[in-house]
Image (cartoon, rainbow, N blue to C red):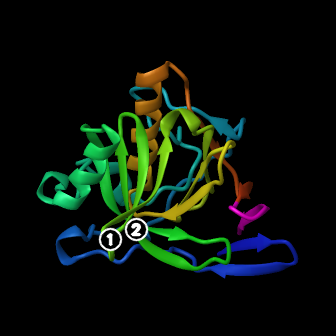
Amino acid sequence: MAWFQSSNRKVQLPAQTRPVLDDDERIANDDEDAESLKLTPTDSSVTEDQNRDPFMGVKVRRKASFHRNYIGDYLDVPSRPYLMKILEKQGDKKVLFADKVLKFTSTGKMKRRILLITDFAVYIVDPDIDALKRRISLAAVEKLCLSELSDNFLAIIIPTEYDLLIASTRKTEIVSVLVDATRSQSDYELEVLLSNSFQLKTDASADIIEVA
């Protein structure tokens, strides 16, 4: 269960939130209820070695996620002219990741969005109106925050702007892509914070996400 706490109110986010996927985008999860071994991290700040799991064994993982092959572009971006137009306008060409996700507002409301990651930026696109809602430079991302539970929540922390909270069944791949892309562009090791309580700044104020 996740709680989004803002000022004096709390909004409950549904546990195991999943983006609504098309038939050809669904992932087999038959074995995700299998028991997993949870290891206690000695340090809550964990960074990914290039050839290792970014979670370093300290996060409860669904069994299926250990054997999932990464594809990157799950939307076939070149076949979608409006996405290509958005990228070309920003001068980006290389798509490292593309998929549908759920984005959370400061009130806990879920909105369906397209997440694009290139070698320079993160894009949030509204698929209903084919419009770019936000572009975040990779250089502006300070760290990634995840709970230690087998949920789908991922927070992207951007100190100079407001943070981004999303839910995706491909969270592990998103983390890996962001860590690798940041390292490739700047030699900076993006921090991956594993904790069941972390700070999240919305466009209005600094709030707290608590996952229990």
> Mark 2–mark 1 contact, CB under 8 Å?
yes
Residue 22 vertical position relative to residue 201 in the rendered view, above or below: below
123 relative position to 80: left or right: right
In the displayed orientation, state which residue is furthest to the top: 187
Label 2 environment density (alpha carbons within 10 Å; few <14, some 14–19, many ≥20): many
Mark identifier at residue 174? none
Q: Answer whether residue 197 is visible to the viewer in this image.
A: no
Kindly give the residue lying farthest to the front in the view shown: 89
Is 8 rendered above or below residue 65? below
- Callout 2 amino acid: Arg
Q: Label 2, secondary structure: give it.
A: strand
Element class at badge 1: loop
**Residue 91 locus on image (x, y percent):** 31, 37
Report whether residue 21 is seen: yes
Q: Nearer the viewer, residue 136 or 185?
A: 136
Q: Quadrant of the N terminus?
A: bottom right
In the image, residue 135 sits, relative to residue 204, either above or below, namely: above
- Categorize mark 1 by other alpha carbons within 10 Å: few (<14), some (14-19), many (20+): some
- Residue 182 in the magenta stretch? The answer is no
- Pinpoint residue 131: horizontal percent, then vertical percent: 35, 65
Identify the residue position indicated by label 1 in the image.
127
Whole-percent x, y for residue 128 in the image: 33, 77
Tell me which segment is drawn in magenta.
202-212
Q: Position of residue 185 (x, y in %)?
A: 43, 23
Residue marked by disc 2: 113
Q: Quadrant of residue 115?
A: bottom left
**Residue shown at 68% from the left, 61% from the top:** 203
